[in-house]
Amino acid sequence: MSTVIILADLLGSKLTKTTAELATVAARIGEVTVVLLAPTGQGLALAESLNYEAVTNLLVVETDSVATHGVAAAADILSQIVDLKKPVAVLIASHAFGKEVAGRLAVKTSSGVITDAVDVSSDLIATQLVFGGSTTVSSKISQGCAIITLRPNSITADLTQGKPSIELLSFEITAVSKKTVITSAQPPVRGGRPELTEADIVVSGGRGTNGDFAPVEAFADSLGAAVGASRAATDAGWYPHSHQVGQTGKTVSPQLYVACGISGAIQHRAGMQTSKAIIVINKDPEAPIFEIADFGVIGDLFDVLPKATQGVTALKS
Amino acid sequence: MKIAVCIKQVPDSWAEKKMVNGLLDRVNVDAVLNDLDEYAIEEALRVAEAHGGNDEGGANSITLISMGPDRASEAIRKALSMGANSAILISDLTLVGADALATSKVLASVIARESFDLIICGTESTDARMSVIPAMIAERLGCAQLTFASAVSVDPTSKKVSITRMSEAGVEEMSGELPAVVSVVEKINEPRYPSFKGIMAAKKKTIHSVDLATLGISIESAYSTVIDAIPRPPRAGGVRVTDDGNGGDLLVAFLAEKKLI
Ligand SMILES: Cc1cc2nc3c(=O)[nH]c(=O)nc-3n(C[C@H](O)[C@H](O)[C@H](O)COP(=O)(O)OP(=O)(O)OC[C@H]3O[C@@H](n4cnc5c(N)ncnc54)[C@H](O)[C@@H]3O)c2cc1C
Ligand SMILES: Nc1ncnc2c1ncn2[C@@H]1O[C@H](COP(=O)(O)O)[C@@H](O)[C@H]1O
C-alpha cells in the first residue's frame, strides 16, 4: 500500500485540530505516516495525542531547528523524509507556514503543489473553492509526489483512537536552510475561546462596533464561538490582528459566520465567503454583505446582539 | 543596493472571474497591479530612501520583475510611476498557464542573472492566492527567506536584514544576510500615489522584455493540472428583516430553525 505523509500541525507547542483532519483525508489515499517536528524533549508527550486509528506510523523528529530557522528547516527535514519513505502525497495544513513549507518542498522534490484544498479524494484529486467561493476547481498533481495543503475546518475529522507505531529519527539540515535566524517568537494570545480557523461558529465585528466589542464577544460566548474582526477593526487597534478575517487575515469556513457592523468589502469576503451559513447585522440596507447573507437583520448591532444573546442563553438553559 | 520587486498583473478583484479550458480567463477582464505588490514597491522605495535614495547613478536601484503577458506593461507603468527605476517583463507564449513551479523558476533565474541584493515581493497574488512564490524563490536561490514582514530594516554595511513576521504563529523577529527574499504584509506601510512628475518620468523608463530563450531556460510540462472548474450555484436569496425591536428574536428563531444551536 502506498504511503501518505502528513505534517503534524503545531501552533506554539500545541497540536491543532487540523492534524486529525489531515490524517482523516490521508487515510483515504494510503497508509498514513505522521511527521511530528517537535521541540527537543517534547516529542513523545506530543505524540501521545496523535493516537488516531487513521494513523499507521508516527515519525517523531525532535529538533529545535524549526524554532530557530523556520520554514526552510521544516522543508529540509521533510524532503529528506520524502526521499526515505517515497510517499505518493504529502498533506500539510494551509496557513502561511504550511503553504511556504509546501512550496519549498515542491521545489526540492520536483513535485507539483496545490494550496488551500477543501477536500482530497482517494485518487488524489484536490478540490478548491476559488474566486470567493463562486467556482469549484478539481485538480491533480501531474509530476512528482502530490504536495497539497488542506484548509483547516474543511472536513470532519475521524477521532477514533488507534495505536500507531512510533519511530524516532533525527536529521541534519544544510547550511543554506540555516540562513534565516529567528531571534524571538511571541505566539498569539489565546483567550478561552476556540481558535478562529477551527471554530464551528465565528462572530465578527467591524467598524460598526465603534471599538466596543463587548456585545460581539457576549454573543460569541453564548454560542461557544470564536471572535473575528474586519481589517477596519484590527487597524483601529480594537481587536488583535491575529483575529482579522479576510484576504490578508485568516480564511475561515465555519458552519455559521455572523458579521456585525461589517460592510462586506471584497477583501473581507475573501476570508469568509465559503462559510456554510452567513448571518448579517448591519444598519445600512445597502451594505454589500447582505448579498451573501442567509439571514440579514437591518438594524443596530447594539440593539440586536444583546437581545439575540439573551435569546440564545434562554434557549440553551 | 540592487533591489528587485516582483510584481504581478492580476484581474481586477471586483471583476467577475471565469475559467476557460481550465485556465483563468485573463483576456476578457480588466487587469490591475496586484494590490499587495504596491506595498512591496513602497517598502523598496522606503528602504532605498533610508540608504541614499534611488536616483540615477545613486546608491540604490529598484528594478521591477514581472512574469506575464505583454499587457502586463500597464501594471508595470503604474509601478514605475511610483518611483522604481526600470523593469524586466518576462513574456513567453510557453508561460501561458504557468504554475508555481514554473513561475518561481523563471523569476529566480532572472534574479540570479542580475545578482540582486534584496528581493521584495507581496505576500499573495489576488488571483492565484497561493502565498508560495517568495518562499520558492528563496529556495531556488538558496538565500535567506524573510517573509510575511510587517516591518523591515536593512543595514547595507553589515549586509543584514531584519524583519518582524506576522502570521498565524504570532509575531516573530528574524534576520538573515543579503541577498535575501522578503515578502511584506499590507500592515507594513501606506503605498504612495504616483505623482504627476512620477507618471511623466515613468513614460521614459525602460521595460526590458525577455523571453525564455534569452534566459536560456525552458519550462517542463505542468506539475499540476486542472481537471474541471464548475461555477457553484449562487447563494440562494436569504431572508432579510428590519429590526423593530424583535430582530434579535428573529435571529435566534433562524438559528433554531436551521439547527445551528
Ligand atoms: C490590500 C488590502 C487588504 C485587505 N485585507 C482585508 C482583510 O483581510 N480583511 C478585511 O476585513 N478587510 C481587508 N481590507 C479592507 C477592506 O477593503 C475594508 O476596508 C474593510 O473590510 C472594511 O471593514 P468594515 O466592514 O468593518 O468597515 P466599513 O466598510 O466602514 O463598514 C462598517 C459597516 O458597519 C455598519 N454599521 C455602522 N454602525 C453600525 C451599528 N451600530 N450597527 C450595525 N451596523 C453598523 C455600516 O453600515 C457599514 O456597513 C483590505 C484592504 C486592502 C486594500
Ligand atoms: N507572475 C509573477 N510575476 C512577478 N511576481 C510574481 C508573479 N507571481 C507571483 N509573484 C510575486 O509573488 C507574490 C506571492 O504570489 P503568490 O504566491 O502567487 O500568491 C506576489 O505578491 C508577487 O510579489
Image (spheres, coloured by chain):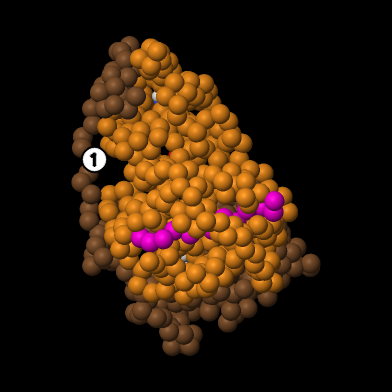
Chain colours: A orange, B brown
The picture places residue B244, in percent across and down from the top left corner, at 30, 13
Q: Secondary structure at mark 1?
A: loop
Q: Amino acid at mark 1?
A: Arg
Vertical order, A196 against A221 (above or below)? below
Is residue A172 visible to the viewer in this orientation of the structure? yes
Q: Is mark 1 within 8 Å of ligand 1?
A: no
Residue B11 relative to residue A8: left or right: left
The residue to which callout 1 is attached is B235
Image quarter for residue B97? bottom left
The chain ID associated with circle 1 is: B
Question: How many numbered marks appear?
Answer: 1
Residue at 69% across / 72% down in the picture? A175
Query: Does the segment drawn in magenta span residue A87?
Result: no
Inspect the magenta stretch and tell me whether residue A37 lies in it. Answer: yes
Q: Position of residue A276 (x, y in %)?
A: 31, 38
Question: Can residue B29 be seen by looking at this rendering?
Answer: no
Label 1 neighbour load within 10 Å: few <14, some 14-19, many 20+:
few
> Looking at the image, is A97 positioned above or below residue A1?
above
Depth check, front residue: B41 or A222: A222
Q: Position of residue B194 (x, y in %)?
A: 52, 57
State the predominant SS element of the stretch in magenta. strand
Q: Which residues are magenta?
A: A29-41
Q: State whether residue A276 is above or below residue A150.
A: above
Q: Eyeballing the image, is A231 above or below B181?
A: above
Taking the spot 63% from the left edge, 78% from the top edge, the residue there is B115
- In the image, is A9 to the left or to the right of A4? right
- Would you say B188 lies left or right of A132 here? right
